[in-house]
Image (spheres, helix red, strand yellow):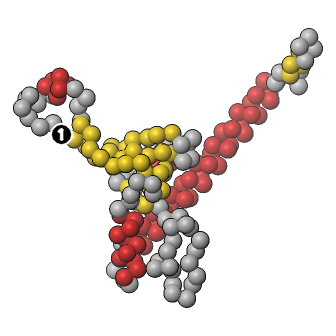
Amino acid sequence: MPQDTATSLRFTTAEEDRMIDRASTADEQILAEAVKLLRESAYQLWLASLCAGPKHLADLFAELKDPKPGDLVMETSTFYMKSHNPLEGIGVLEGVGQAPYFKTREQARAAGYKDDEALPTRLVWDLRLIFDGNRPFRWENASFIKVKTSEALSPAVCHKSAPAVK
């Protein structure tokens, strides 16, 4: 690697820059594939909980369909759409609420709403994306399920003879 002898700084060559770029891209691809596998596993557990069966399946379904703030969650409404970034589909739920469609009353008027009319809202899910630097991300009008983690598995979900997973 070339060095500036006057300052003893080391510079990368163009080929080394390309190698670093390829490695970074490869790492991102590996992470994206790992997240896809995690999401697929979580989705398969969700699908398994939809069938009729023992009470622990009904309990699992109830838990997965109603995530709470602090839970690891996965977005399901665009699960099979390849156009979405898989890293934005999983994170820690910070809150669920309603947000107005229009930021200002003027925007609502421009859309045909009168001043005395109630403005429409949309369901929003606020997450911290754990595979993308914990950055905040807001989903609108989406569906989510809780992702079971090993810490969250309870003896009620496991067979009675099997020890609880920790």
Q: Quadrant of the C terminus?
A: bottom right
Q: Nearer the viewer, residue 65 or 46?
A: 65
Q: Name the image quarter holding the N terminus.
A: top right
Residue 71 sits in quarter: bottom left
Closer to the camera, 29 or 103? 103
From the image, tell me which residue sits under label 1. Answer: 120
Q: Residue shown at 50%/45% (left/top)?
A: 129
Q: Position of residue 165 (x, y in %)?
A: 58, 74
Residue 73, x across and y down, in percent: 45, 56
State the residue lying farthest toward the bottom: 161
| Residue positioned 93% across, 14% down in the render | 5
Instruction: Determine whether, in the image, residue 120 is placed left or right of residue 97.
Output: left
Residue 49 visible in the snapshot: no
* Secondary structure type for disc 1: loop
Q: Residue 70's spot in the image, x, y percent?
A: 45, 54
Q: Is residue 8 above or below residue 133?
A: above
Residue 57 drawn above or below residue 120: below
Residue 112 is left or right of residue 161, and the answer is left
Name the quadrant containing residue 7: top right
- At label 1, counting other C-alpha atoms closer than 10 Å, the crowd grade (few under 14, some 14-19, many 20 or more) is few
- The amino acid type found where label 1 is placed reads Pro
Q: Is residue 43 left or right of 124 when viewed as pictured?
A: right
Residue 18: % across, % down:
74, 30
Q: How many marks?
A: 1
Looking at the image, can residue 109 be seen? yes
The residue under the point 34% across, 80% down is: 52
Which residue does the image show at 43% across and 51% down from the upper left?
A: 93
Q: Camera-side residue: 8 or 47?
A: 8
* Above or below, comparing residue 115 to residue 92 in the picture: above
